[in-house]
Amino acid sequence: MIVMQDIVRVFKNGAIGVRALDGVSLTIDGGEFIAIAGTSGSGKSTLMNIIGCIDLPTEGSYYLDGEDVRHHSEDALARIRNHKIGFVFQKFNLLPKFDALTNVELPLIYRGENRNESGERAARLLEKVGLAERLHHKPNELSGGQQQRVAIARALVGQPQIILADEPTGNLDQQSSKEIMGLFKQLNFDGKTLVLITHDQEIAEQAHRIIYLSDGRVEREVR
């Protein structure tokens, strides 16, 4: 599903170029559950942004479902993000003025889908993640773990093939982290490809494969 070869990402700082990624090559098969681990500054989030088509590499090739995304237009990249990839972030990124149902429904609203159908799908997903009784609660009325469940439902609502999760347990207590990881494992069991970015070794070890980054390079892989 994902093939990356010699990926380089250089960020300009005045006249100086900083190589956030320096020749990263990796392959991710459909249905895999992998963790990308490393310390702060290792290149984890930069790699996630490229996998998620939020950013493009400076050099190297990235094939998603056999297509080289470097040659896609901005509109084509936006369609990939909206249809093929679901994102889960450490800070949840929920809109505070909307309730859980509307937050989950938003990606479908942006697509222009029927509101009745999108609302029904959002409600079913909130039920699936254990929030059937919280549909009309706003983010500030939910716990951190519940907010992350809303974020996961939102990531799933567009029926993506891939879920990218960037430090999804970073703001959660131990019990909530355990519950969220259990939910991710179930999603992977159901067939989703799951890519988890983390600095937490205990969280990383729950994946089927760990790719360790250091100074923008793949240091080692552990299965």
Image: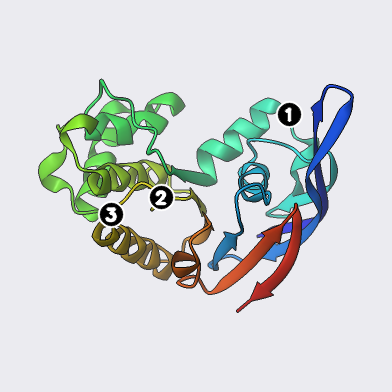
Is the C-beta separation of discs 1 and 3 under 8 Å? no
Which residue is the extreme one toward the left?
133
Residue assigned mark 3: 173
For discs 1 and 3, the disc positioned in front in the rendered view: 3
The residue wearing badge 2 is 170
Asked which secondary structure carries label 3, the reply is loop
Tally of numbered tags: 3
Q: Quadrant of the C terminus?
A: bottom right
The kind of residue tagged 2 is Gly
Tell me the amino acid under the disc marked 1.
Ser
Q: Position of residue 67 (x, y in %)?
A: 75, 48
Q: Foreground: 163 or 121?
A: 163
Element at label 1: loop
C-alpha gap between disc 2 and disc 1: 33 Å
Give the mark, 2 or 1, whose residue is nearer the N terminus: 1
Q: Quadrant of residue 195?
A: bottom right
Q: CA distance from mark 2 to mark 3?
A: 8 Å
In the displayed orientation, state which residue is furthest to the right: 15
Within 10 Å of the Cα at label 3, are there few (<14), some (14-19), or many (20+) other Cα atoms?
Answer: few
Looking at the rendered structure, the secondary structure element under dot 2 is loop
Q: Quadrant of the N terminus?
A: bottom right
Q: Residue at 53% across / 46% down in the picture?
A: 85
Q: Is residue 192 above or below residue 92?
A: below
Hey, what amino acid is under mark 3? Asp
Of residues 32 and 116, the one nearer the viewer is 32
What separation in Å lies between label 1 and label 3 (alpha carbons)?
40 Å
Compare residues 78 and 140 and report the one nearer the observer: 140
Q: Position of residue 123 (x, y in %)?
A: 21, 42
- The residue wearing badge 1 is 73
Left or right: 69 as drawn, with respect to 199: right
Q: Residue at x 61, y 44 (%)?
A: 52
